[in-house]
Each structure stands twice: as structure tokens, then as C-alpha cells.
């Protein structure tokens, strides 16, 4: 709500800086262009996913509760996040690689998803807890969605993760967060066939 108010105020303030005669000369084209530029400058700003209140960041994946809105999705071991609604989650696979190798494969997958490599870098990296935050934007309107992933070792040769994707703006995401995580699971590269699913403690 704060960001929406800021966006509208920025647009109104920017338009208000123009002399009235200039605004009349610029006509309809400029009246349309200015809000569009203001909108995209906010959507593409670099402050998302960095822990600023209301703008996304690292979340408590161990005690995660689902929102009242449908604009999120979770992939996690069956025993993780017990208070998260079943209709907005699915069970994470167990992979026959250690947590470090799974992280490398996940990073390689992100590199393939983003046309600009810098966009695949985490906005928050908690190496001690293997917890990372990323921002991915929707293709057309560039709405920023926040991805949290925590890599969970099971033993020396197997691992899994808790993976959560959620929108910052809007009530419904039209299934985008679920679609994103489904694609990520499909596109994880350089892994042997997935092993049987297992319940693990995060």
C-alpha cells in the first residue's frame, strides 16, 4: 500500500512540475507517456528483495504461514511449513546430490531463465543457513516477485530445498508463482533422475 501510494504521488508530482502551458503543448501523448515511465521506473527499481519493509526479502521458512491471498506458492518437504495451506504447495523432490551441488544447479537454472546474468544474482545471500533471496519480474508489466530458497542437506549425497515465490503487488497472481516454481523444477539442469520423495526436517 505504501508503494502504491508512492507510485501515484510520484506520477502526480512529476506532472505537476511542468508549467500548465507546457503540459497543454505536450498533449495526450505525453500525458500517457509520463505515467508509463513512472510505473516502469518503480517496477524495475533495484530496492526489491533486500529486506525493506513491504518490498520483499528474507522470510522465516521454518515457521512460514500462508497469506490470505492466493498470490504465492511453496515447494517444500512434507514436514516443512506445516501451517502452510495445502492448496498452495507441493512436495519438494529429494535430489541425489549434496546441498552445495543442488545450489550450483539451481544457480545455473536461474542463469538460463534470465537474459541478463546480473538479474540472476541473489539480493540477499545467507551462506551460513544456505538461504537466498531473488527477484524475478513478470514479462510484460515487470511486477517484482520475491523468491526465497533454502537448500537442505539430508546426508552427504542427498539434499532438497524449501522454495517459495510470492508477489508484492496485487491480490491474485493468476497462477504465476505456481507456474514459476513448476518451471524451475522442470528446468533444474545437470541432475540425475530424482530420487523418491522423503520427509525431512528443515
Image: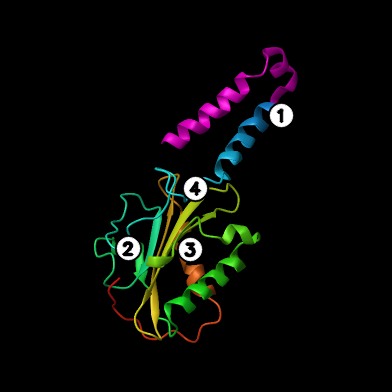
Sequence order check: which comes first, mark 1 or mark 4? 1
Going from the N terminus, do you reach mark 1 or mark 2 first?
Answer: 1
Q: Quadrant of residue 118?
A: bottom right
Q: Nearer the viewer, mark 2 or mark 4?
A: 4
Q: Which residue is under mark 4?
A: 48
Give the residue displayed 41% in from the left and 86% down from the top: 157
Which residue carries the number 2 mark?
Answer: 87
First in sequence, mark 4 or 3: give its number. Answer: 4
Earlier along the polypeptide chain: callout 2 or callout 4?
4
Which is nearer the eye, 124 or 85?
124
Label 4 close to label 3 by CB (< 8 Å): no
Rendered location of residue 186, percent (x, y): 51, 74
Q: Position of residue 57 (x, y in %)?
A: 42, 52
Give the CA separation, mark 4 to mark 3.
Answer: 21 Å
Query: Which circle marks residue 135 in the picture?
Result: none
Residue shown at 69%/25% (left/top)?
A: 28
Q: For the magenta stretch, what is the residue range?
A: 1-28
Can residue 175 be seen here? Answer: no
User: As drawn, is 62 to the left or to the right of 141?
Assistant: left
Relative to residue 36, is residue 47 depicted above or below? Answer: below
Task: Residue 4: say if magenta.
Answer: yes
Can residue 158 be spotted in the picture? Answer: yes
Crowd rating for badge 3 (residues with CA inside 10 Å; few <14, some 14–19, many 20+) = few
Along the viewing direction, whichever of 124 and 81 lies nearer the viewer:
124
Q: Secondary structure at mark 4?
A: loop
Instruction: Quote the CA–CA distance across marks 1 and 4.
Output: 30 Å
Q: Quick one: SS at disc 3? A: helix
Q: Secondary structure at mark 1?
A: helix
Disc 3: which residue: 179
Amino acid at each position: 500500500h505504501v508503494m502504491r501510494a508512492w507510485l501515484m504521488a510520484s506520477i502526480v508530482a512529476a506532472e505537476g512540475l511542468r508549467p500548465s502551458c507546457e503540459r497543454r503543448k505536450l498533449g495526450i501523448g505525453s500525458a500517457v507517456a509520463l505515467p508509463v515511465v513512472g510505473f516502469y521506473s518503480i517496477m524495475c527499481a533495484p530496492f526489491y528483495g533486500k529486506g525493506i519493509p513491504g518490498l520483499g526479502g528474507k522470510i522465516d521458512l521454518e515457521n512460514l504461514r500462508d497469506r490470505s491471498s492466493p498470490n504465492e506458492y511453496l515447494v517444500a518437504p512434507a514436514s516443512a511449513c506445516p501451517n502452510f495451506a495445502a492448496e498452495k504447495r507441493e512436495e519438494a523432490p529429494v535430489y541425489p546430490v549434496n546441498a552445495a551441488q543442488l545450489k550450483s544447479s539451481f544457480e545455473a537454472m536461474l542463469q538460463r531463465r534470465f537474459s541478463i546474468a546480473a538479474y540472476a544474482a541473489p539480493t540477499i545471500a545467507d551462506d551460513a543457513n544456505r538461504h537466498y533471496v531473488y527477484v524475478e519480474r513478470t514479462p510484460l508489466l515487470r511486477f517484482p516477485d520475491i523468491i526465497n530458497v533454502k537448500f537442505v542437506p539430508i546426508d552427504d549425497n542427498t539434499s532438497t530445498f524449501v522454495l517459495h515465490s510470492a508477489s508484492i503487488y496485487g491480490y491474485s497472481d493468476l497462477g504465476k508463482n505456481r507456474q514459476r516454481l513448476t518451471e524451475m523444477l522442470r528446468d533444474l539442469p545437470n541432475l540425475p533422475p530424482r530420487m523418491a520423495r522423503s520427509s525431512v526436517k528443515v
